[in-house]
Amino acid sequence: MFNTGSFSDVMRNLDWSVLTNMLLRAVPALICITLHELSHGYVAYRLGDNTAKNMGRLTLNPIKHLDIVGLIMMIAFNFGWAKPVPVDMRNFKSPKRDMAITALAGPVSNVLICCVVLFIYGLIFLPCKIADTTFADSILTLVYVTAYLSIAFAVFNIIPIPPLDGSKVLFSLMSDRSYMKLMRYERYGMIVLLLLVATNVLGNPLTVATDFVFEKLFVFADWGLALSSGLFY
């Protein structure tokens, strides 16, 4: 039989702040991943490729887009990936051009999400501070982390290393022969990226780049705060 008294002691001594912090990063990460992949699929669909639609990937269900390792990387290192949306570029009128547009749709969506979420952050900042509760602070943190992870996801995905989105944009400028040759190594790209991020060889430069872009976009939070100040004062 289980010793319920011992279990209660363990639960009381458990550091819930660690679990809370994980949740406050996991939820934003899932939001960023889901909207990123949905954007890929939707743009591909609009350009003539029904592959993602037929495979049920035009959905807001995060489970459909989830890659466990990529999610863990986002939670631990701010940079990660999702399960790629299937795209058949043979269905495009202009395969390489439309593939580049489809690839760009993901990072662009994350930049837009960051801008909108930062505006919301500025809008709710004063009410949450006035409320001065743990719940209000958690909401502020959740919104802030969502904005940061969204732009981090965008910055990471524009790296021109297969299978990231930046590689598909770069390859669209190459000859068909060079494009197909380089795509053969796509399966190894994520292993290389995983090692580079985990060892901070790529992690530190990515953090610097993300912080720089995030700081520039923080003007949207200022606009939200300005609007909120006008309403409260």
Image (cartoon, rainbow, N blue to C red):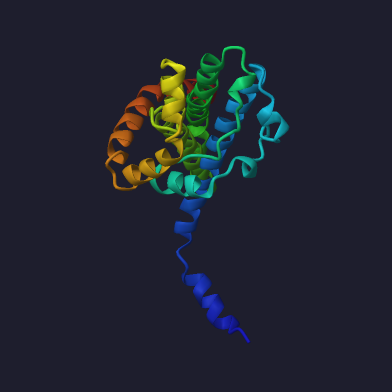
Residue 19: image x %, image y %? 49, 57
Report whether residue 220 is seen. Answer: no
Q: Residue at x 64, y 41 (%)?
A: 64
Residue at 53 percent of width and 49 percent of height = 68
Front residue (pair 155, 98): 98
Q: Which quarter of the figure has residue 205?
A: top left
The residue shown at (45%, 30%) is 183
- The picture places residue 182, in percent across and down from the top left corner, at 41, 29
Residue 51 lies, in percent from the top left, at 67, 29
4 is higher (above) or lower (below) than 158: below
Q: In the orientation shown, which residue stands out farthest toward the bottom? A: 1
Asked whether, in this view, residue 99 is left or right of residue 178, the answer is: right
Residue 126 locus on image (x, y percent)? 48, 33
Q: Residue at x 69, y 25 (%)?
A: 50
Total numbered labels placed on residues in the image = 0
Say which quarter of the image contains residue 220.
top left
83 horizontally vs 206: left or right:
right
Looking at the rendering, in which quadrant would you find the N terminus? bottom right
State the residue in front, 34 or 215: 34
Query: To which quarter of the image does residue 93 belong?
Result: top right
